[in-house]
Image: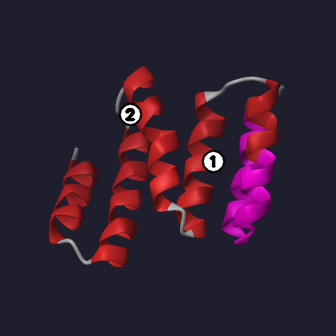
């Protein structure tokens, strides 16, 4: 599996708004072998598709296993922002903002 090439393809699908196709493709690739990069792509596609809770379920283990690198922080910040948009809970927006600052 060429993770870099697959991640680039997934990124293009996400940029074009083809979230469901990106989710399906990421899940199929992850069945072949685990990859933190692919899990991050899956989380982004899930979040953008509106499945923010599932996105966080995918991303939290990544943060636990790999640490909170800037990309993971940004993804979590974005998911928290989307949760805030859905729920209106101010603490989610504040937590999102803190993730972007670190």
Q: Is mark 2 on a helix, strand or loop?
A: loop
Q: Which residue is drawn at 60% across and 38% down?
A: 39
The kind of secondary structure the magenta stretch mainly shows is: helix
Mark 1–mark 2 Cα distance, whole angstroms, equals 17 Å
Which residue has dot 1 on it?
42
The numbered mark at residue 69 is: 2
Q: What stretch is highlighted in magenta?
A: 4-25
The numbered mark at residue 53 is: none
Does residue 81 show up magenta in the picture?
no
Mark 1 or 2: in front is 1
32 lies left or right of 70: right
48 lies left or right of 69: right
The picture quadrant where one finds residue 85 is bottom left
**Residue 62 placement (x, y as % from top left):** 47, 31
The picture quadrant where one finds residue 72 is top left
Q: What element carries label 1?
A: helix
For mark 1, does the 10 Å Cα neighbourhood hold few (<14), some (14 to 19), or many (20 or more) residues? many
Of labels 1 and 2, earlier in sequence is 1
**Residue 88 placement (x, y as % from top left):** 25, 78
9 lies left or right of 97: right
For mark 2, does the 10 Å Cα neighbourhood hold few (<14), some (14 to 19), or many (20 or more) residues? few
Quarter of the figure that contains the N terminus: top right
Q: Which residue is drawn at 38% across and 26% down?
A: 64
**Residue 50 placement (x, y as % from top left):** 54, 69
Does residue 19 show up magenta in the picture?
yes
């Amino acid at each position: 599996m060429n993770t870099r090439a697959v991640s680039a393809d997934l990124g293009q699908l996400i940029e074009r708004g083809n979230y469901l196709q990106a989710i399906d493709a990421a899940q199929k690739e992850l069945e072949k072998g685990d990859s933190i990069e692919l899990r991050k792509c899956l989380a982004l596609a899930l979040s953008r598709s509106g499945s923010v809770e599932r996105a966080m379920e995918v991303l939290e283990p990544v943060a636990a296993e790999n640490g909170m690198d800037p990309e993971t922080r940004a993804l979590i910040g974005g998911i928290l922002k989307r949760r805030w948009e859905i729920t209106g809970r101010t603490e989610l927006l504040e937590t999102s903002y803190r993730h972007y600052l670190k």
